Image: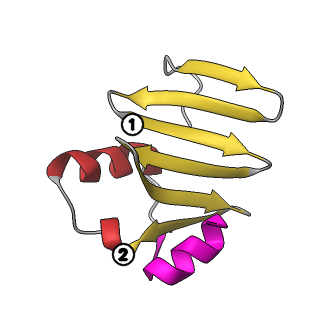
Amino acid sequence: MNENSKFVQIVVKNMRLVKKYHNAHYLTLKGTTYYFSYESLVMVEKDGNIYISEEYHKYSKTTSKHINLFLDGRTDAKIVSISEFKEIAQL
């Protein structure tokens, strides 16, 4: 993430919640980052890999905008099935 961006951060022990954009937040917990558009988990970064749920791969203009903001130019995200996404996210 861009260090010069102005984020709203809340830090609780090993957890950090960051507001990236209006209705776009991410939460880092135990080395895994969970990305939310509104209240929906749309992307997970784990062990240096980025995973996007196929459920949210083709969505609204705003959610797509949020995902692109989160990706910050990265092009190596993997689109995975909903069941694989839940397993990766440990849901």
- Magenta stretch? 76-91
Q: Is residue 80 visible?
A: no
Point 37% across, 51% down: residue: 67
Q: Is residue 50 visible?
A: yes
Question: Is 43 placed above or below 20 here?
Answer: below
Taking 17 as reference, is 11 left or right? right
Question: Is 16 placed above or below 88 here?
Answer: above
Mark 1, secondary structure of its residue: strand
As drawn, the residue found furthest toward the left would be 61
Question: Is 56 placed above or below 70 here?
Answer: below
Residue linked to disc 2: 54
As drawn, the residue found furthest toward the front would be 91
Q: Disc 1 versus disc 2: distance between alpha carbons? A: 18 Å
As drawn, the residue found furthest toward the right would be 13
Mark 2, secondary structure of its residue: helix
Q: Nearer the viewer, residue 72 or 54?
A: 54
**Which percent across, then down, holds residue 37?**
36, 45
**Which percent across, then down, holds residue 13?**
83, 28
Point 42% across, 70% down: residue: 53
Taking 81 as reference, is 57 left or right? left
Point 68% across, 62% down: residue: 46
Taking 70 as reference, is 12 left or right? right
Residue linked to disc 1: 24
